[in-house]
Image: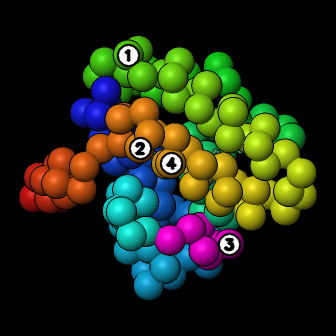
Amino acid sequence: KVEVMKDVTLGFGEALQHCREQSQLTEEMMEEFFHFWRDDFKFEHRELGCAIWCMSRHFDLLTDSHRMHHENTDKFIKTFPNGDVLSKQMVTIIHACEQKYEEETDHCWRILRVAECFKKTCTDQGIAPTMEMLMAEFIMESE
Ligand code: M21
């Protein structure tokens, strides 16, 4: 599962450059998307929430009310090798996190909180990829 999460992270992260300008997420706030999984990564910039919003839209993963589109998200995860071992669990986690922050009316802030909750839950459930895995693959891909 951690292998699949690594692939989904890097796949999803490919939309970061596309979303940088409109979200105003500077490289100082987040250099590469996989830094999301660093132990010391802080969820403090609203711009990151805006960027994840844009990235999710890029892959058509949101409904008209800017919540996760369950079916499309499930399909997106399944486009990665062995994605089926993770898709249901990931959708369940994100949905639970969305419900926790339902009262936040600013979409960028809400999505940032959902992302933070998603990371924490993944770490607790032992499905968070390690930085070693992410960096090794990231460097391989860019060579
Ligand atoms: C697996 C890699 C990364 C995913 C990161 C962001 C996850 C956070 C999901 C937020 C989805 C937004 C839903 C809005 O209610």
- To which quarter of the image does residue 91 belong? top right
Task: Give the mark, 3 or 1, whose residue is nearer the N terminus.
Answer: 3
Kind of residue sitting beneath label 2? Thr
Q: Are marks 4 and 1 in contact (CB under 8 Å)?
A: no
Q: Residue at x 30, y 44 (%)?
A: 129
Per the image, the residue denoted by label 1 is 85
Kind of residue sitting beneath label 3? Arg
Residue 20 in picture, x, y percent from top left: 54, 71
Q: Residue at x 74, y 64 (%)?
A: 109
Q: How many marks?
A: 4
Kind of residue sitting beneath label 1? Val
Kind of residue sitting beneath label 4? Lys
Can you say which quadrant of the picture contains the N terminus?
A: top left
Q: Are marks 2 and 4 in contact (CB under 8 Å)?
A: yes
Per the image, the residue denoted by label 4 is 120
Nearer-the-camera pick, 37 or 22: 37
